[in-house]
Image (tube, rainbow, N blue to C red):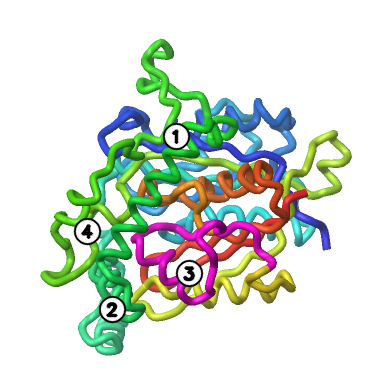
Amino acid sequence: MPEAVIVDAVRTPVGRRGGALAKWHPVDLLGHTLRYLVERSGIRPDDIEDVIAGCAMQHEHQSGNLGRHAVLSAGLPESVPAVTLDRQCGSGQQAVSFAAQAIMAGSMDVVIACGVESMSQTPLPNAFQPGAALGPQYAPLELARYDGGLLAQGASSELMNTRFELSREALDGYSIRSHRRALAATDAGRFREQLVPITTDPLDPTSPAVDRDEGIRRELDPAKMAALRAVFAEDGATTAGNSSQISDGAAALLITSEEYAAAHGLRPRARLRALAVAADDPIIQFTAVLPATRKALKQAGLEIDDIDLFEVNEAFAGVPLMFQKTFGVPDDKLNVNGGSVAIGHPLGSTGARMLTDLLHELERSGGRYGLQTICEASGTANATIIERV
């Protein structure tokens, strides 16, 4: 079976909702990222066989196969096709899986996997709430099956906190750590190599440059964090401070066959060793990262102790804490440069952003294996294992 390898990976800085990237239309934001990836990698644009774009909220500015429009706005050849997929928060990670699977199947040699979300330009709609997609025939069956229907993710986070005995103090402490680690990584220049050069105004190249993730806080008062009101339950533990941020951003990875890379003088940076997806309790919603991880480890023939770095999406601080509690992962292997609590969570791009971060950090630290997993609305999750070349 052909090997799928990552040749290059880039991402925009992550902007806060209404912040530094708010003027960028999502098509332009992704197109700008695609153009930079192609130019930086030196790939022949005519060789690109598909562009697979993740996007979670496909309405308003993000409707109508925005991946194809991003290809055209990037100035890539008309012959380059594109498709847009939705696996909620894992959309960008699923794009990588589909790209790698096409290459492993022998049907393609060059695919770009990417993701984008402009949560400034495409706000959360009513359609994003649980149950909105239910049809009249089967909706009553699902509602009966789950005692009135599914929950919003915030309410589910409180169920997770209770089941895994995650205290408010633990959630807040983890969130402060996420900001501190992301800030340390930024100050040390660890993200610099992966960031797409971009300005605040897409129509004015002389406008201020955006060269860092906007949501990371330099000063964070633990007392103020502890004083924040629980959002989803009167006696709950989930707050705005220990949840992911609403954000804008894009990311893209160039995936090729090992043979193509060798024939065209490209340097593979990592192999895709495992591509897993799993589903679990749709009420709690976040626990599928556990069976997804077990599936990925089994695919790769690895044990949890073989993994050098873990990236677990911080949809809520409780998710990586649940993961850590279940698998016994040490602090110095888990989200070492912070995560979505600090950096932000532009839904469709986060999986591609995290994998970009993971690749660069494996190279920086000299690690061999990295595992990434993301929980997704209604109880699914992706898990991916990469091996640094």
Q: Position of residue 197 (x, y in %)?
A: 51, 24
Mark 1 and mark 2 lie on one chain; the one further toward the N terminus is 1
Q: Which residues are magenta?
A: 306-333
Q: Amino acid at mark 3?
A: Gln
Q: Amino acid at mark 4?
A: Thr
Q: Nearer the viewer, mark 4 or mark 3?
A: 3
Q: Which mark is residue 324?
A: 3
Q: Which residue is mark 2?
A: 162
Q: Which residue is mark 4?
A: 239
Whether the residues at callouts 2 and 3 have beta carbons within 8 Å, the answer is: no
Q: Which mark is residue 13?
A: 1
Q: Amino acid at mark 2?
A: Thr
Total numbered labels placed on residues in the image: 4
Distance between mark 2 and mark 3 Cα atoms: 16 Å
Left-right relation of 221 to 53: left
Distance between mark 2 and mark 4 Cα atoms: 15 Å
In this view of the protein, which residue sits in the foreground, 251 or 289?
Answer: 289
